[in-house]
Image (cartoon, rainbow, N blue to C red):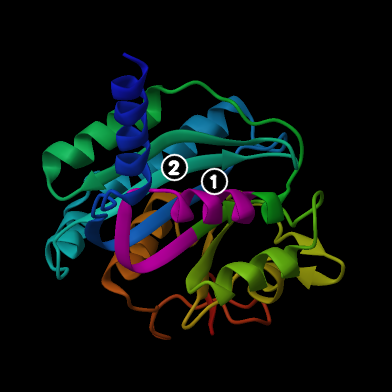
Amino acid sequence: MRQPRLAAAIAALAALFFATPATAEEVDVELVLAADGSGSIDDDELAFQRRGYAEAVLSTEVLNAIRDGIHGSIAIAYIEWGGPASQHTIVDWMVIRDEASASAFAEALVTRPRAAWGYNSISAAIDYSVHKMETNAHEGIRRVIDVSGDGPNIGGRSIHAARDEAVAKGIVINGLVIQRPGGQPRIVGGRPLSLVYEQDVIGGPASFVMVADENVSFADAVRRKMVLEIAGRVPDRGGAVLAADGLGGGYARVR
């Protein structure tokens, strides 16, 4: 009796190790939305951010951008980040290709509880997002991490090391700087926060920063940004422009 059982066990192990791996689902973009959930974001602001992303995913502009892709679908995950030990998946990978799948993502996003705590480890958020991309069941033509926040990197490892390692793996990192309407532009070490994001956070071919402020609402900025990321385009320099010197409102410099 032992020999048949041993043979069956060996066969099972062989099947496990030598079986052809499942084919990853092909999509146009693997997109991680990495949103600030740190201590500087209160509960109302957190809910406001989530609604902005939910509305963007449901918008006609974003859905049309998805349909216009080669595969007509994207894989998207939403995470919130806080301190170095506080990165959390709020909505795990979902494939969006139509109104029904977009509605499912949006509903999950606005109903999940808050999880992040602590202050501003963008580097850990990037590392966490890269890991999610490397362990998912999707194969995107492009891979993009979309980091939004109202402050610079504070804790965790070097932001430049995290960014550069992600870019070396073919991942583009874009940024969305959140500035409260009516507030003064945040200055960090003598630099506007938009310039901090440009120099320290974003990376990869044609990466860019957008700013949500009194000139460009958060919801509008998120929607425009997602359309560009899904379509594989960058902001033009017309309209509302935020150059690296901090003038105006809207877009920051495109790399």
The amino acid at mark 1 is Ala
Residue closest to the far right: 189
- Residue 59, above or below 6: below
Query: Can residue 50 be seen at all in this image of the molecule?
Result: yes
Q: Is residue 135 on the magenta stretch? A: yes
Q: Give the quarter of the figure containing the N terminus.
A: top left
Residue closest to the far top: 1
**How far across and down, in percent of the image, does residue 172 sit?**
49, 71
**How far across and down, in percent of the image, does residue 17 sit?**
38, 46
222 or 15, which is in the foreground?
Answer: 15
Residue in the image at 54% along x and 56% along y: 130
The total of numbered circles placed on residues is 2
Question: Could you classify mark 2 by the number of other residues whose Cα lies within 10 Å: few (under 14), some (14-19), or many (20 or more)?
Answer: many
189 or 139, which is in the foreground?
Answer: 139
Residue range highlighted in magenta: 125-145
Residue that carries the numbered disc 1 in the rendered image = 35
* Disc 1 and disc 2 in contact, CB within 8 angstroms: yes
Query: In which quarter of the view is residue 189 placed?
Result: bottom right
Q: Secondary structure at mark 1?
A: strand
242 or 108, which is in the foreground?
Answer: 108
Residue that carries the numbered disc 2 in the rendered image = 78
Residue in the image at 73% along x and 37% along y: 85
The amino acid at mark 2 is Tyr
Q: Is residue 232 left or right of residue 210?
A: left
**How far across and down, in percent of the image, does residue 102 sit?**
21, 41
**How far across and down, in percent of the image, does residue 194 sit?**
65, 68
Q: Earlier in the sequence, mark 1 or mark 2?
A: 1
Query: Can residue 210 be seen at all in this image of the molecule?
Result: no
Question: Could you classify mark 1 by the number of other residues whose Cα lies within 10 Å: few (under 14), some (14-19), or many (20 or more)?
Answer: many
